[in-house]
């Protein structure tokens, strides 16, 4: 019978943790919890479930997941975030896989992940459509998360299959969370990826995002939640170029000041 290590990332995850853990513990032979500095009741909830928490500073999602898999005792891992909840069909399929014949280490399985914003299901949330199907069940000897600062993926497997059922991804639970993540994601994107520093491109990209992710996607039919997802896409598309432009201007001004100082010396 296949042994499975569940790797769960937490940080101030008390809001949903009590719902996230029970289905995971049904499929887990061990549960690795890696926390990056919770100040709410997250650690207490983990202790109530009899779980040991490993503490590790957060740099990027993929790096944190890869650290968690290094702590696993088993080669097969299921990597989860603390706002993702498995339904009974997903649990049953994972248990079936565990009870069956040995699995091909080159194969991975993708979760059917349905996105929720402000507690309501959405069809799109920039830059993905819902559902999306991220690889989360894999053999850690052949696959791992890549190093992308935003929207990381599991790489190294030869093929992947979809799991049946639904995984509820209950993200962006408040307006504060929406704008906090918007700021965090765009800052990391500009820091780690090459973005052209152009205000004009930012304006054009934002207009395009508004039409694609709000009007053409039908998000406008979803009332205030659709307005939030449309605004998120528009601002994300603009802010990544704006922040790149702002950083570029800072560097140019700094270089000009150094040249002036050297001439004055």
Image (cartoon, rainbow, N blue to C red):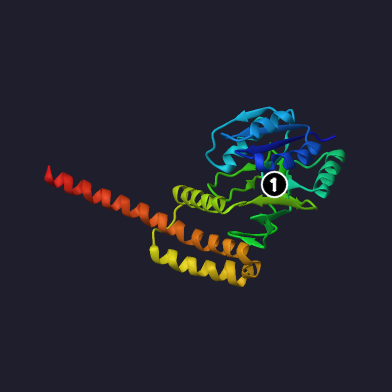
Residue 48 in the image, given as x and y percentages of width and height: 73, 30
Picture layout, residue 41 above or below residue 93: above
Q: Nearer the viewer, residue 71 or 115?
A: 115
Residue 246 relative to residue 188: left or right: left
The residue sitting at 54% across, 37% down in the picture is 58
Residue 44 in the image, given as x and y percentages of width and height: 67, 30
The residue sitting at 53% across, 66% down in the picture is 209
Residue 67: name its quadrant.
top right
Q: Nearer the viewer, residue 87 or 258?
A: 87
Q: Quadrant of the C terminus?
A: top left
Callout 1 secondary element: strand
Residue 196: name its quadrant.
bottom left
Q: Quadrant of the N terminus?
A: top right
Picture layout, residue 123 above or below residue 55: below
Residue 166 relative to residue 142: left or right: right
Mark 1 Cα shell of 10 Å, populated few (<14), some (14-19), many (≥20): many
Q: Nearer the viewer, residue 211 or 148?
A: 211
The residue sitting at 49% across, 60% down in the picture is 235
Residue 174 relative to residue 98: left or right: left
Residue 123 relative to residue 201: left or right: right
Residue 34 in the image, given as x and y percentages of width and height: 63, 33
Picture layout, residue 99 above or below residue 173: above
The residue at which mark 1 appears reads as: 84
């Amino acid at each position: 019978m296949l042994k499975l290590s569940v790797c769960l990332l937490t940080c101030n995850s008390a809001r949903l943790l009590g719902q996230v853990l029970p289905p995971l513990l049904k499929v887990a032979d061990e549960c690795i919890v890696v926390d990056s500095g919770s100040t709410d009741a997250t650690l207490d909830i983990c202790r109530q479930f009899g779980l040991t928490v490993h503490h590790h500073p957060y740099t990027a999602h993929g790096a944190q997941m890869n650290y968690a898999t290094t702590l696993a005792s088993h080669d097969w891992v299921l990597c989860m975030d603390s706002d993702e909840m498995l339904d009974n069909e997903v649990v049953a399929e994972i248990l079936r896989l565990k009870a069956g014949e040995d699995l091909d280490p080159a194969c991975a399985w993708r979760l059917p992940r349905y996105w929720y914003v402000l507690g309501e299901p959405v069809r799109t949330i920039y830059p993905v459509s819902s559902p999306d199907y991220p690889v989360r069940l894999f053999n850690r000897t052949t696959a791992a998360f890549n190093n992308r600062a935003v929207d990381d993926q599991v790489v190294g497997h030869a093929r992947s299959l979809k799991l049946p059922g639904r995984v509820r991804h209950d993200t962006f639970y408040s307006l504060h969370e929406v704008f906090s993540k918007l700021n965090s994601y765009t800052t990391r994107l500009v820091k780690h990826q090459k973005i052209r520093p152009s205000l004009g491109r930012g304006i054009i990209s934002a207009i395009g995002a508004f039409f694609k992710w709000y009007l053409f996607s039908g998000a406008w039919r979803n009332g205030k939640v659709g307005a939030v997802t449309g605004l998120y896409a528009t601002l994300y598309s603009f802010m990544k170029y704006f922040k790149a432009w702002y950083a570029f201007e800072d560097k140019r001004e700094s270089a000009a000041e150094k040249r002036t100082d050297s001439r004055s010396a």
